[in-house]
Amino acid sequence: MQYEGVLRKMRTELNDPVDYYLVLPGDFIHMNLLLGRTLEISLLKYQCLGCGEDRPIFRQGYCRSCFFELPQAGDWIMHPERSRAHLGEEDRDLEYEQAMQLQPHVVYLANSSSVKVGVTRKAQVPTRWIDQGAHEAIEIVETPNRYLAGITEVALKEHVSDKTHWRKMLTNTLKDEDLVAWRERLRPFIPEEAAPYFLENARETQIHFPVTQYPEKISSLNLGKTPTYRGVLKGIKGQYLIFADGTVFNVRGSEGYYVSLSLNGS
């Protein structure tokens, strides 16, 4: 069986374990059902998620031109504290920025490689935690806009990491943390403007991933350098496919790649 299309990050559902779906034009693949099967992935061309042209992908699934021009790739996405829509100030497209920034956002703690702080739209909980490969997470504050969440994250990352160590996450050398205790420890550092939005009663969310074999040593697959790869799928965590030989493939990091995917084995 063979599929073809441009890669976008896998869609997910919080079940036990998480269900993953790779969506392609006119079809989708329930990736959990492919564990133990041989997959062959080949890069056919590029297809920018912005203009749709066959141009080398620069970042986030966009070609260089789209990355520096489209509002979907604005600086405030990676740096929420730079959001300005609440002031009526435009970065690239004020209507788009108001729609994205002026909605509830959550500042959270997630444990994927170690405890980290992050920001996401409320509508993206728990999707964001799953995408980061977190096995446990908890909300800290829920703010009415992205700016307040952003300045809270900046304040808290002085006291806790804001990074995920993806190699550690994929080898599963993790330990459980008391995220409620972490939240209380960080509470005094929440900015005054965001303090009224502290979530007193939020509980930890536990997340389990469909993995039958974790890699001991990791080799990252870059289709730009290795256009074709074939291996037995052993797990899915975060947005990574994990193969029996220790190769891992970051689906989200390969957005905008137009690929063929062949399935063999049972």
Image (spheres, grey):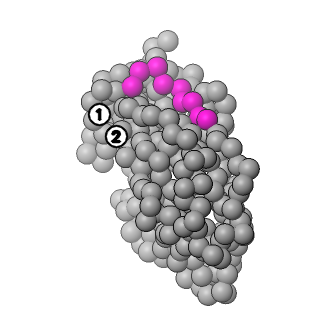
Q: Which residue is at a point 65% across and 71% down the rendered structure image? A: 194
Q: In the structure shown, which secondary structural element does the residue marked by tag 2 occupy?
A: helix
Pointer 1: residues within 10 angstroms few (<14), some, or many (20+)? some
The answer to which of 135 and 256 lies nearer the viewer is 135
Q: Are marks 2 and 1 in contact (CB under 8 Å)?
A: yes
Say what amino acid the circle numbered 2 marks. Answer: Arg
Question: Where does label 2 land, which residue?
Answer: 167
The answer to which of 24 and 191 lies nearer the viewer is 191
Could you tell whether 232 is left or right of 83 in the image? left
Q: Report x, y in % for residue 207.
A: 59, 34
Q: Which residue is at a point 72% across and 55% down the rendered structure image? A: 200
Q: Report x, y in % for residue 18.
A: 61, 32
Question: Where does label 1 land, which residue?
Answer: 218
Q: Report x, y in % for residue 71.
A: 56, 73
Q: Which residues are magenta?
A: 206-214
Q: Earlier in the sequence, mark 2 or mark 1?
A: 2
Q: Which residue is at a point 40% across and 61% down the rendered structure image? A: 59
Q: Report x, y in % for residue 217.
A: 27, 30
Say what amino acid the circle numbered 1 marks. Answer: Ile
**Nearest to viewer (mark 2 / mark 1):** 2
Could you tell whether 91 is left or right of 163 in the image? right
Q: How many numbered marks does the figure carry?
A: 2
